[in-house]
Image (cartoon, rainbow, N blue to C red):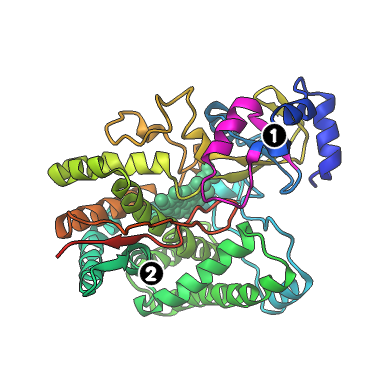
């Protein structure tokens, strides 16, 4: 159990060399401008936190907010002290009505991998990794390219030469990919997008009891479908990842149907939500740095490096949680056993102690790949290659089809309210004939 916020703060203060109250006063108020759910432009607050209070207790989310690169990386790395078991826990407690709906609907999903801990995590990850074969990714490449071309052509057919790249191109591409990988009917893209939005909102959002109710219904439907996918794979076989996992059971792999359904529940969310954001961010950030967009038009071989710089500069997930399993410390600050920790990768990626001129977007930097946007250590993102492949293809195709693409005049892009997923609400674009 986490200590109540005031106790955690007192416990930390007792063994802690840093005077948090004095620091907060010196910074002109608590939290240094950090607003956990407001992701429109969190970077000035991140910079202030790194400077003034790199490990700060935030009672609004009952988390220790960690913002320096070295601390974020070492906490990810030290899985024995910092467990991921809270990574998928709802930030806002489930209300009574949402809880009733989910219990009665047989909702028993939690996490495929990211919130599981060794030895269970080690066992399932090894089996899942074997199913994530390069052969499967390679086979998907032409489909990804084809889907991108089709989505672009539909957007570019708009006679007023304006569109929303997020909704019209980035939204579908990775969703079709992951549904194909898992053998799900691709006509179901809107359904899975609806379920995924609910998952992001119910776990990392800031919903009150009433707002949770429709999302609770969606999560029940989503989980029941994951169970049905496993049942179907047992009955019909197939050439997809779920069928591979079911077949692995027969070949002696120790994985239950519930664990396979949980993996499906994870992948059918993690496998597209973040990649849609990455593809949208590639366009949004590059078009806001026109000269670098032009460099890619000139030399598309630089696209892979540009994708890494987008991941560093504007990652799809800006913060991820861990739980302290013992009294410990991070960056010299005492952390009590049971405390929740929020590792702010969005800040670590702009730490001046690691990256030169970190606030500058620069596709020619050679160390962009050291970003922490995919986490680090035993839970390092299983789908990182697939995500980068899709962003690369999407950029290649977009640059080839419409090199004169630009952000629409006066575009002021807002971001979804969330603790972890920094999702642009739209990417308005325009182009010449
Ligand atoms: C831009 C796209 C993506 C980003 C930014 C991203 C980010 C992350 C992060 C931050 C974690 C947690 C790492 C940790 O706890 O140390 C993670 C884990 C994971 N990701 Fe991704 N991800 C992306 C795309 C994908 C895709 C496309 C898939 C699947 C096809 C995927 C599957 C997973 C899985 C299964 C885990 C859990 C791994 C484990 O706990 O062992 N991700 N990802």
> Where is 272 relative to 10, above or below?
below
Would residue 215 appear left or right of 237 to someone viewing this image? right
Q: Nearer the viewer, residue 23 or 308?
A: 23
Coordinates of residue 148 in the picture (x, y in percent): 24, 64
Disc 1 from disc 2: Cα separation: 40 Å
In this rendering, is residue 47 above or below 182? above
Give SS at disc 2: helix
Pinpoint residue 201: horizontal percent, then vertical percent: 59, 63
Please report whichever mark, 1 or 2, sits nearer to the chain's N-terminal start.
1
Residue 256 placement, left or right of 2: left
Q: State which quarter of the image contains the C terminus.
A: bottom left
Residue projecting furthest to the top: 17
Residue 56: image tag: 1
User: Residue 80: x, y in percent?
Assistant: 64, 35
Q: Which of 410/310 is in front?
A: 410
What residue is disc 2 on? 179
Q: Which residue is depicted at the point 66% across and 50% down?
A: 86
User: 206 above or below 315?
Assistant: below
Q: Position of residue 184 (x, y in %)?
A: 39, 74
- Closer to the camera in the image, 393 or 309: 309
Residue range (magenta): 33-58
Asked if the beta carbon under badge 1 is closer than 8 A to the nearest atom of ligand 1, the reply is: no
Left or right? Give the position of 319 relative to 164. right
């Amino acid at each position: 159990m986490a200590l109540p916020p005031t106790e955690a703060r007192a416990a930390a203060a007792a063994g802690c060399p840093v005077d948090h109250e004095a620091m907060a006063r010196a910074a002109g108020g608590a939290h240094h401008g950090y607003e956990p759910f407001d992701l429109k432009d969190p970077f000035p607050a991140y910079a202030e936190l790194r400077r003034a209070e790199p490990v700060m207790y935030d009672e609004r989310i009952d988390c220790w907010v960690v913002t320096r690169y070295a601390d974020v990386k070492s906490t990810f790395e030290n899985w024995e002290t910092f467990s991921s078991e809270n990574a998928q826990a709802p930030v806002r407690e489930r209300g009574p009505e949402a809880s009733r709906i989910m219990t009665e609907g047989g909702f028993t999903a939690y996490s495929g991998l990211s919130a599981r801990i060794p030895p269970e995590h080690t066992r399932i990850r090894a089996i899942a990794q074997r199913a994530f074969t390069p052969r499967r990714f390679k086979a998907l490449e032409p489909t990804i390219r084809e889907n991108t071309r089709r989505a672009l052509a539909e957007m570019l057919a708009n006679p007023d030469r304006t569109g929303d790249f997020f909704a019209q191109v980035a939204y579908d591409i990775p969703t079709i990919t992951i549904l194909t990988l898992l053998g799900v009917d691709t006509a179901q893209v809107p359904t899975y997008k609806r379920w995924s939005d609910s998952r992001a909102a119910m776990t990392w959002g800031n919903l009150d009891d009433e707002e949770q109710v429709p999302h609770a219904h969606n999560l029940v439907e989503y989980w029941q479908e994951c169970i049905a996918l496993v049942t179907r794979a047992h009955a019909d076989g197939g050439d997809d990842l779920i069928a591979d996992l079911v077949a692995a059971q027969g070949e002696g792999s120790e994985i239950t149907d519930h664990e396979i359904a949980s993996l499906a529940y994870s992948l059918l969310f993690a496998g597209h939500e973040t990649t849609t954001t990455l593809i949208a961010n590639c366009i949004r950030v590059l078009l806001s740095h026109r000269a670098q967009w032009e460099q890619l038009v000139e030399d598309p071989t630089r696209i892979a490096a540009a994708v890494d710089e987008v991941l560093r500069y504007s990652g799809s997930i800006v913060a991820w949680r861990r739980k302290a399993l013992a009294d410990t410390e991070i960056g010299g600050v005492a952390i009590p056993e049971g405390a929740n920790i929020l590792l702010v990768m969005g800040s670590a990626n702009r730490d001046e102690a690691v990256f030169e001129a970190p606030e500058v977007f620069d596709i020619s930097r050679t160390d962009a790949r050291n970003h922490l946007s995919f986490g680090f250590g035993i839970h390092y993102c299983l789908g990182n290659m697939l995500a980068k492949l899709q962003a690369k293809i999407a950029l290649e195709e977009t640059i080839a089809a419409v090199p004169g693409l630009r952000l629409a005049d006066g575009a002021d892009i807002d971001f979804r309210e969330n603790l972890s997923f920094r999702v642009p609400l739209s990417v308005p674009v325009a182009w010449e004939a």
